[in-house]
Every structure is written in C-alpha cells, then in structure tokens.
Image: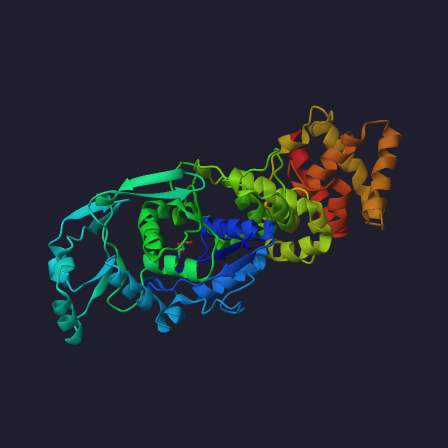
Amino acid sequence: MTKIRTRYAPSPTGRMHVGNLRSALYEFLIAKHDGGDFMLRIEDTDQERFVEGAVDIIYRTLEKTGLVHDEGPDKDGGYGPYVQSERMKTGIYMKYAKELIDKGEAYYCFCDKERLATLKTEVVEGKEISIYDKHCLSLSKEEVEANLAAGKPFVIRQNIPNEGTTTFHDELYGDITVENAELDDMILIKSDGYPTYNFANVVDDHTMNITHVVRGNEYLSSSPKYQRLYDAFGWQSPVYIHLPLITDENHKKLSKRSGHSSFEDLLEQGFVTEAVVNYIALLGWSPEDNREIFTLDELIKEFDYHRISKSPAVFDIVKLKWMNGEYIKAMDFDTFYEMAEPYLKAALKKDFDLKKIANMVKTRIEVFPDIAEHVDFFEELPEYSVEMYTHKKMKTNSETSLQVLKDMLPILEAQEDYSNDGLYQTLVSYVEEKGVKNGYVMWPIRTAVSGKQMTPAGATEIMEVLGKEESLRRIRKGIELLEQSV
Ligand code: GLU
C-alpha cells in the first residue's frame, strides 16, 4: 500500500479562517491516523493577495494547535521547494504547461485587456467571469512563434472541448459529471509567469505524491477542470474530500462579520487552543458514538474521513463556549492561572490574592473574559438593592439580616483571624448559639460583603480575600442600608 501523504496548502492572505484550520486538521488526522506524512505547502502565486506576516501566522497556528508537519519549507522531505513562488523559479509549471500545449490540451493566448473586455460574461458563484471564446486556439504555430519572439505578453489556457462530459470523484459527493461546454478555458500560467492556483495545485499535488486532498467545497466546481489536467498528463488524481461550508447561526457563510471566523479571533476572545481544535474537528465530522471531548491524540485514533458529513456545519459559539468551559475545568491550576492572570489583573487593580480568586472562578467560567463579571465586586462594592437580603429559602428578610449583621459586627471587629477557616468557625458558632440554619447568617453576610446575588465563593472566603478592614466597612454599609429601609 502507498503511504498516505496529505498537504495543508494555505495561501498567506491573513488570519487563519476556521474553515482553513478545519482543512488542515482533517488533512493532519487523515495522515496521522494511518501513519502517513502531513506536509505544508505555501501557495503564494497570487501576489496581489499576499499579506505580510501571514506566513508567520500559518506556522504559529500549526505549532500552537499541535498539527506538526513532517515536511514543509522549514523541513525538507525531498519534495521541495515547498513554496510555490520558489517552485515557479525551478521552471516546473512552465515545463508542464508546455507539455500540455504539445498535447493540444493547452494553448498560448495573446488577447489583450481590451479584447477580453468585449467577451461574454457569466456569473459563477457570485463572481462575474468572462468566458473565453478560444480566439487564440486558431493561431498557427508560426503566428504563436512570431508573437513569442516579439515578446508579446501571453497567458497559457487550458483547452477544453465544447462537446462531451467530464467526470470526477469526490469521497463525499460521489461521481460528479459536468458538460464540457460549461467549463471555461481557464488560465494555467498568468502573464506574470506565475501559475494560477488552478494549475499549480494539480502539478504540485502530483509531483509531491499527495494521496488525499481535503479542501472547502468552493473548489468543487473547478474540480472537473483539474480532473481533465490529471487525465491529460496521464496521472492518477488524489482522493478528493470537499468539505461542506461552515455557516454562522443564520446559515450564512461564516465571515469576518461574525467576529469569530478566525483562530486568532477565538484566542483573543479567551478560548483555549485545545477546545477550539476539538470543536473544529466536530464541524462536519462525528465519531460513531456521541462522544464530544477529544484530545488531538484521541482524534488521530478515532478519525475516519468516511464519517465526514455533507451537510453544512453550523459554527455554534454557544456550544464552543460550553466546550471551552469543560477544558478550563479540566486544566491543572498552574496552567489555568497563567492564562487567567491577565484577565484578573485587568479587573482587579487593588492588592488581592489573585490565586485565591482564580481558584474561585475556575469552575465557573466558559471563556477567560467571563472572569471580570465574577470578580468585579472585590474591587468595588456595587450599589445594590436592599431586597437582596430577602431570601425565601434561607428564611431571611431585611429585619433578620439587620439583626445578624448588627450581632456579627462587634464579633468580627474583635476577630483577629481573617482566614476562611477562622471566619467560618466564628459564623458557625453564632449559627449554633441562635439555633438557626447556616444560610440565615451566611446569606446576609455574603450579600453585605459582595453586594451581589451570585458570587464565585461563600461569605467567609470572600472576606478572607477582602481582609478585615474592607469586610467590616462593607458590613457597616449593609447595616446602614438596612436601617434606612426598615
Ligand atoms: N491555497 C488554497 C486556499 O488557501 C488551498 C486550496 C487547497 O487546499 O487546494 O484556499
């Protein structure tokens, strides 16, 4: 059996779209599931779309996500160069384009902009493209030679007959047959000498021995043309897996507008890399059971591309948040703290024991920015309504709360030990003395020291972090508030 070789072939055009990361992940998983090789190829033939720094983003993302490539521009595996602009300099694309010309499968085209502007246009997938009329196909060999010798700018086009059909196979979509008349004579080599993606992907996938190609289904409509190139060369095409579109909640293509269409967006929004990778794996693929949490190693083991679905995958940020929360809960504390610290520091300027606070919120957040809303009351006691002291289940109201706070104030003033345990002992002694339920005392104290209905910890843990002075100040404030209301 031939060794599986897959490639991730990004164009360095900016941030890493979630869809691209999914292609990379699936390519990686297909290779690693079978002990194959995963290769990185940089597709930079479209110089107009090139964005400075985008290559770094590609490397950083692969490294961070653990999609380690076996070969690439930085790791020679004998199939280089791995950057298309460098491959071009070796003359490889021109060589194969000329072979197609010799076979009558391609031809030189010298039409200038003015002539091309007069051609019929058609809207294909929202884009207006002009349909080339094969004008230059009728040039004689001599005319072509003369034009070339005169240095006339040219492109090389694929020659697709107007009759017959072309069939190609996709693993998800099955056999797809199209009328050749519907296929345009696409450009293989541009006037700047660069190959188009359409040509380079075929030459490269073949010469780099790629066995499986995973990419977005926006390439599905061009695939018959690629198939014709494979056939013209007498090459076997790789296994094609065209992935369904990723949509937002409104079933529109996931775009920048959603605010979370790229890997970088998600990191900036406090998502954990492992959770993102896990979630993206499930955007179109599912295991045999209903399991949802997978490490990368587990994905390698379980991944079977035959289980990829054709239906559009909805990017559900709510689900991703839930999954992220599960990863945060499972994280060891030191890793968590390292990631949480900047968020804690942004929310809390005063001198608190941030580790203690981090411990309180670890199981309560889904993404790191959630930290702020859980801890803001430490910094500043919020304005709160006296009604918060009334709690049916705890059997508390303004009067009972006022009594508890007034009783506790001198005790807490006299108390030296402001540790959670010490404070808890003190509060529980009072509970026992009065023969009441815990909540009857804890609720008003917690309300007074936090001013919030929901807190990431109980009254005494909060007081431990606030310290004696601030705790007492807040309890006195509570008393004041309650006295005004009863
Ligand atoms: N360079 C193409 C892109 O970034 C790759 C498509 C493919 O995987 O063949 O969309």
- Residue 14 shows in this picture: no
| Position in image of residue 349 (x %, y %) | 62, 57
Residue at the image point whose x is 16% and y is 65% from the top: 110
Q: Quadrant of ligand 1?
A: bottom left
Q: Nearer the viewer, residue 25 or 96?
A: 96
> Where is residue 309 drawn, in percent x and y?
48, 37
Q: Is residue 223 left or right of residue 293?
A: left
Query: Residue shown at 24%/67% (left/top)?
Result: 191
Q: Is residue 453 above or below residue 273?
A: above
Return the residue nearer the eye: 355 or 1. Answer: 1
In the image, taking residue 317 as reference, residue 461 lies left or right, namely right
The x, y position of residue 297, in whole percent, is 64, 50
Residue at horizontal 70 percent and vertical 43 percent from the top: 449
Count of numbered labels shown in the rendering:
0
* Colour basis: rainbow
Q: Residue at x 47, y 56 (%)?
A: 210
The C terminus: image quadrant? top right
Compare residues 382 and 7 and report the one nearer the observer.
Answer: 7
From the top left corner, tell me how far across and down residue 237 is, in percent.
41, 51
Say whether residue 155 is visible. yes
Determine the image quadrant of residue 81.
bottom left
Of residues 144 and 74, which is closer to you in this image?
144
